[in-house]
Image (cartoon, rainbow, N blue to C red):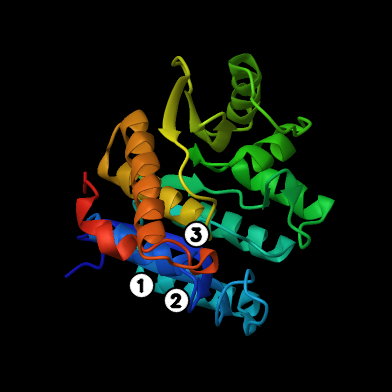
Amino acid sequence: MSHNNQKKIAVINDLSGFGRCSLAVAMPIISYMGIQSCPVPTSIFSNHTGFQDYFFDDYTEHMEEYMSKWCKLGLEFEGITSGFLGSKRQIELVIRFIEEFRSERTRVIVDPVMGDYGKIYATYTEELCREMERLTAYADILTPNLTECCKLTKTPYKEGEWKEAELEQMAELLLEKGPKNVVITGIPQGDFIVNYIKEKGKEARIISTCKVGTERSGTGDVFASIIAADAVNGVEFERSVRKASHFVRDCILRSLELQIPLTDGVCFEDILYTLERN
């Protein structure tokens, strides 16, 4: 009997008990899409930091031993995905995990969570941003938002619409760092939100969806989870981005219908059955 008869994704992220983000979002979505979701917790929150008060427990010192037990089990992964990382040590451990478990069939998806709306998170120092840039070299797929893309490419962030040539230049700079596929997410263009796709050796493509509501906690985690599962399932990248974009939009619409507070994320559970599994 083997532990490796079913496709698996190692999901390296924090766990928030309430607020629908990180592992709490990734695990059910990846599982629904027919892949075993194997969490690697980086920290534990009672609820995410968008709330005024929360419990927090850093799991960094346990991650190495946690990973070593998986080595002893001989686990193999078709996917490895990472999200928010809170320290240089955590990024080093993710790189080590990738080097230890990556095989020819493994797809690595890095969501370089560093900031949003033109601002880098207060916990992210310049050193930590440089470490995140080092991690991007290990990615097969990179999913930065516009703020993170600007930081990684040293491009000044600006409000308002972006020209396609500007997005093309940034996407090419990201590809030069090592990833095979890049999608720059959440680009505001008038009444639309744009996701800009660039794959090595292919023409860039743009996926536009109508802007609905306002940004909510965890939407990036929903998006990245679908991209990761589709990558392991062999779904073509543009189709995957289109699927993820539309599903996030539908999740926001359903959350508005139910009058869900912004801090509580999106009620993806209500419409998960509508998501194409492959």
Q: Nearer the viewer, residue 217 or 1?
A: 217
Q: Residue at x 48, y 79 (%)?
A: 17
Q: Nearer the viewer, residue 21 or 267?
A: 267
Q: Is residue 174 left or right of residue 68?
A: right
Q: Position of residue 212 (x, y in %)?
A: 45, 44
Q: Is residue 209 left or right of residue 47?
A: left
Q: Position of residue 247 (x, y in %)?
A: 34, 47
* Disc with the residue nearer the chain's start (3 vs 2): 2
Q: Nearer the viewer, mark 3 or mark 2?
A: 3
Amino acid beneath label 1: Leu
Q: Position of residue 31 (x, y in %)?
A: 27, 62
Crowd class of label 1 (few under 14; some 14 to 19; many from 20; radius 10 Å): few
Instruction: Report if residue 156 is visible in the image.
Output: yes
SS for callout 1: helix
SS for callout 2: helix
The N terminus: image quadrant:
bottom left
Q: Which residue is mark 3?
A: 218
Q: Position of residue 30 (x, y in %)?
A: 32, 58
Q: Nearer the viewer, residue 70 or 133?
A: 133
Q: Are marks 1 and 2 in contact (CB under 8 Å)?
A: yes
Q: Which residue is mark 2?
A: 69
Report which quarter residue 176 is drawn in. top right
Amino acid beneath label 3: Gly
Q: Are marks 3 and 2 in contact (CB under 8 Å)?
A: no
